[in-house]
Image (cartoon, helix red, strand yellow):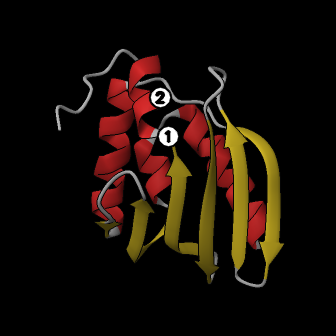
Amino acid sequence: MSPKQLVLQWVAAFNRGNADELAQFYSDNAVNHQVAERPVEGRENIRQMFEREFFHAEMICLVEQVFEDGEWAILEWKDPRGLRGCGLFHIHNDQIIFQRGYWDKLSFLRQHNLPLPTR
């Protein structure tokens, strides 16, 4: 499967809000680094991260663009509340081995009425 196809399947799983299903897209030693957070290493830790995030907020990813270059896919997205972001996915043997995401954490927290950082 191409990186673009895999990312589009990842988006569909993300929009179902199922952390177990989503985790299956990652290799055992994958790294997910959302730049507003610390990197998360390992499939099980990534699964737990998504489980926590889906518990606290209803998240929907609306695809704007998906670009592909070799083993990489770049996802430009927005959500129904207007937040926009970008994700970079390094895919090898049909699994995500590295993901980095860029988005505005403060706007996300405000939109979902979540606690704001105090420092």
Farthest-out residue, top: 113
Farthest-out residue, front: 119
Which quadrant is the C terminus positioned in? top left
Q: Position of residue 45 (x, y in %)?
A: 27, 59
Establish if 72 lies above or below 19. Answer: below
Report the number of discs: 2
Residue closer to the observer: 95 or 107 = 107
Q: Position of residue 51 (x, y in %)?
A: 34, 40
Q: Position of residue 101 (x, y in %)?
A: 53, 57
Residue closer to the observer: 82 or 50 = 82
- Reading the image, the residue beneath label 1 is 104
Q: Is residue 93 visible in the rendered structure shown here?
A: yes
Drawn side of residue 117 relative to residue 102, left or right: left
Q: Secondary structure at mark 1?
A: loop
**Marks 1 and 2 close (CB-CB < 8 Å):** yes
Drawn side of residue 1 relative to residue 106, left or right: right
Residue at position x 35%, y 53% in the image: 47
Drawn side of residue 85 relative to residue 110, left or right: right
Q: Residues within 10 Å of mark 2 (few under 14, many from 20)?
A: some
Quadrant assignment, res 42: bottom left
Drawn side of residue 116 relative to residue 5, left or right: left
Q: Which mark is residue 107?
A: 2
